[in-house]
Image: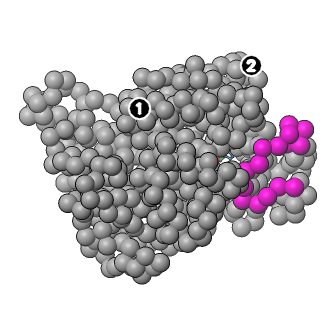
């Protein structure tokens, strides 16, 4: 596994160096490998650039994701095709993107649970999906189906905002029998999306997701939930709050989803509320940057070296140099927060914002998985005197997450085509320099 973020040499993982002392301490000479698991509605993104009246004409809501009747989705597709407006067909799905980006950033294995066409012809959506997925994403557990994976018509407006119209195909047909308990219970994290819960009542996806989170919870594997779109949350706010209380360790959302979930529009206050139900919160806020919120035990808190920030919670970033912990692992839990403005003030030109949030989450997952990996391989390290959720501080993770979002904004697809530049050897120093 690569080190999360790009740091100076002194911070690099010692475990790859084959330290002879370490080899004696550990029964095995090879580092124990880690992995993360995710469940997704397997789909491709079919991207087209359209004026806003196109969305209005087709009854689509800007910025959101709607599942359409197949005939309606087909009509949109045909119109785009006739107008030669389709620019690409690329692997998508919010969890597929997150796992792919995780594998690219961490150079580590991730396991995707989902469906895949039993027979694949060159050039079809299923073929595109496989072509555009990192070889570090393990696709061996996919459930074969007769029928197609989903198609997500991704409509990009002039301002870079994206709206989704989905032709679901067989994407919600994933049955619990195609999960692997052992893989889930030995993972560093299980990632799911709220989208999984909007399947039809006769489709198994919701039950499958519930089975997976139950197994993860049983084994103490962090469950990471990304909210998807505000509409899913708005419809069942109480249900989601209870779901998070019951199963979820980390919530990832943008400020609209935060509002839908908590009724609070200010991201910091919304994060504070979500901390009543979960242990760690990532809230992206477009051009405002992003917030991370979590808990630390008073005995392990670390004060920031940056200036204290004003906000609805005054000096909220005071302990942002702390590494987050589960609330239940703290003797005296304290809420901690950090905020970071967009990397380098944001890109000069945003290609499209699709997947910027997924990118930030992949970075957070990388740091969490790195912590598990390090704990397994160097269990006696001072880093693990307390059970932290991440390897780095809240502040450092936010920089890394933001840096990855930036990389997604300046490229075309939500999936990273390569990792971050190796020579960016210190985030601290290069962070604000253009
Ligand atoms: N207009 C912008 N200018 C500068 N940075 C931006 C802009 N939009 C997004 N970002 C960066 O990308 C991150 C994530 O963006 P955003 O809040 O739009 O995610 P999202 O809505 O969850 O996206 P998606 O659902 O497509 O993955 C932000 O925290 C910020 O760092
Ligand atoms: N799993 C899933 N992903 C979606 C849905 N709608 C949009 N997305 C994905 O969200 C990604 C951006 O976050 C895009 O690449 C889309 O493929 C949905 O209903 N389910």
Magenta stretch, residue numbers: 59-74
Element under disc 2: loop
**Can you give x and y, in whole percent of width and height, for residue 273 in the image?**
49, 63
- Foreground: 348 or 288? 288
For label 2, the residue is 146
The residue positioned 17% from the left and 34% from the top of the image is 18
**Can you give x and y, in whole percent of width and height, for residue 151 in the image?**
75, 38
- Foreground: 131 or 299? 299
Query: Could you tell which of marks 1 and 2 lies nearer the N-terminus?
Result: 2
The residue positioned 36% from the left and 78% from the top of the image is 315
Please tell me in which quadrant of the rendered image residue 170 appears: top right
When the figure is inspected, residue 26 is found, relative to residue 158, above or below; the finding is above
The residue positioned 43% from the left and 76% from the top of the image is 313
Please tell me in which quadrant of the rendered image residue 231 appears: bottom right
User: Looking at the rendered structure, which numbered label has been put on residue 181?
Assistant: none
Tell whether 306 sits left or right of 354: left
- Foreground: 308 or 52? 308
Comparing labels 1 and 2, the label whose residue is closer to the camera: 1
When the figure is inspected, residue 349 is found, relative to residue 423, above or below; the finding is below
Quarter holding the N terminus?
Answer: top left
For label 1, the residue is 218
Badge 1: residue crowd in 10 Å (few <14, some 14–19, many ≥20):
few
62 drawn magenta: yes
When the figure is inspected, residue 199 is found, relative to residue 153, above or below; the finding is above
Quarter holding the C terminus?
Answer: bottom left
């Amino acid at each position: 596994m690569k080190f999360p973020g790009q740091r100076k040499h002194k911070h690099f993982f010692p475990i790859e160096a084959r330290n002879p002392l370490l080899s004696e301490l550990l029964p095995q000479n090879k580092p124990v490998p880690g992995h993360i698991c995710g469940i997704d509605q397997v789909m491709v993104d079919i991207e087209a650039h359209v004026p806003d009246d196109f969305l209005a004409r087709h009854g689509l809501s800007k910025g959101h994701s709607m599942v359409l009747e197949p005939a309606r989705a087909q009509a949109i597709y045909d119109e785009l095709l006739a107008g030669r407006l389709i620019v690409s067909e690329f692997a998508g799905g919010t969890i597929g993107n997150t796992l792919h980006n995780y594998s690219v950033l961490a150079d580590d294995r991730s396991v995707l649970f989902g469906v895949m066409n039993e027979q694949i012809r060159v050039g079809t959506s299923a073929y595109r999906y496989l072509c555009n997925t990192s070889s570090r994403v393990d696709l061996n557990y996919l459930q074969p189906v007769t029928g197609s994976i989903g198609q997500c018509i991704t409509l990009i407006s002039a301002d870079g905002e994206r709206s989704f119209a989905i032709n679901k195909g067989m994407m919600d047909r994933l049955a619990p029998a195609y999960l692997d308990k052992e893989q889930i219970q030995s993972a560093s994290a299980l990632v799911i999306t709220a989208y999984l819960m909007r399947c039809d009542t006769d489709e198994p996806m919701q039950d499958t997701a519930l089975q997976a989170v139950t197994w993860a919870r049983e084994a103490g594997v962090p469950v990471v939930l990304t909210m998807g779109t505000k509409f899913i949350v708005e419809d069942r706010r109480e249900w989601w709050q209870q779901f998070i209380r019951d199963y979820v360790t980390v919530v990832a959302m943008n400020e609209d989803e935060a509002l839908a979930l908590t009724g609070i529009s200010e991201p910091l206050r919304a994060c504070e509320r979500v901390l009543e139900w979960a242990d760690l919160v990532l809230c992206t806020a477009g051009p405002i940057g992003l917030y991370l919120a979590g808990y630390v035990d008073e005995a392990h808190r670390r004060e920031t070296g940056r200036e204290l920030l004003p906000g609805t919670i005054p000096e909220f970033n005071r302990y942002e140099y702390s590494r987050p912990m589960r609330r239940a692992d703290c003797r005296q839990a304290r809420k901690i927060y950090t905020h970071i403005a967009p990397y380098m003030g944001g890109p000069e030109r945003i290609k499209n914002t699709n997947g910027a949030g997924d990118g930030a989450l992949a970075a957070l997952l990388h740091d969490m998985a790195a912590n598990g990996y390090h704990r397994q391989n160097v269990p006696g390290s001072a880093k693990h005197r307390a059970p932290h959720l991440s390897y780095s501080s809240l502040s450092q993770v936010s920089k890394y997450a933001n840096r990855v979002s930036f990389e997604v904004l300046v490229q075309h697809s939500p999936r990273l085509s390569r990792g971050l530049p190796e020579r960016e050897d210190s985030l601290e120093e290069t962070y604000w320099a253009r």
